[in-house]
Image (cartoon, rainbow, N blue to C red):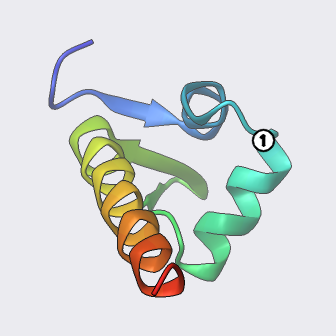
Amino acid sequence: MSADEVLTLKEVAMLLRIAERTAYMMVQRGDLPGFKVGGQWRFKHTDIEDWIEAQKHFDRAKRERWSK
């Protein structure tokens, strides 16, 4: 998968191992970075990878804060 590849909603859902409906709701709320092309959601692979990294750091900071 190339870094500048554009993914469909279905592909993002498979990558994140979540239901398509969950991915749809997340992008609708602005929780996932995406853009519409012809009325359908698309995602840059690099944006999804960056989002995953940000979620890992957010979760780690939240756990550290709660463990104090």
Please tell me which residue lies in front, 6 or 57.
57
In the rendered image of this protein, does residue 12 appear above or below residue 39? above
Q: Is residue 4 left or right of residue 30?
A: left
Quick one: which residue is furthest to the top in this view?
1
Residue 15, position in %: x, y? 54, 27
Mark 1: which secondary structure?
helix
Residue depicted at 68% across the width and 30% down the height: 17
Residue depicted at 78% across the width and 41% down the height: 20
In the rendered image of this protein, does residue 12 appear above or below residue 40? above
Residue depicted at 75% across the width and 66% down the height: 25
Q: Is residue 49 left or right of residue 59?
A: left
In the rendered image of this protein, does residue 42 appear above or below residue 4? below
Q: How many marks?
A: 1
Residue depicted at 43% across the width and 60% down the height: 34
Q: Is residue 26 left or right of residue 59?
A: right
Please tell me which residue lies in front, 38 or 43.
43
Quick one: which residue is furthest to the front in this view?
68
Residue 26, position in %: x, y? 66, 66
Please tell me which residue lies in front, 64 or 23.
64
To which quarter of the image does residue 54 belong?
A: bottom left
Q: Amino acid at mark 1?
A: Glu
Q: Is residue 61 left or right of residue 4?
A: right
Q: Residues within 10 Å of mark 1 (few under 14, many from 20)?
A: some
- Image quarter where the N terminus lies is top left
Residue 24, position in %: x, y? 72, 57
- Image quarter where the C terminus lies is bottom left
Q: Is residue 57 visible?
A: yes
In the rendered image of this protein, does residue 30 appear above or below residue 41? below
Q: Is residue 33 visible?
A: no
Q: Which residue is mark 1?
A: 20
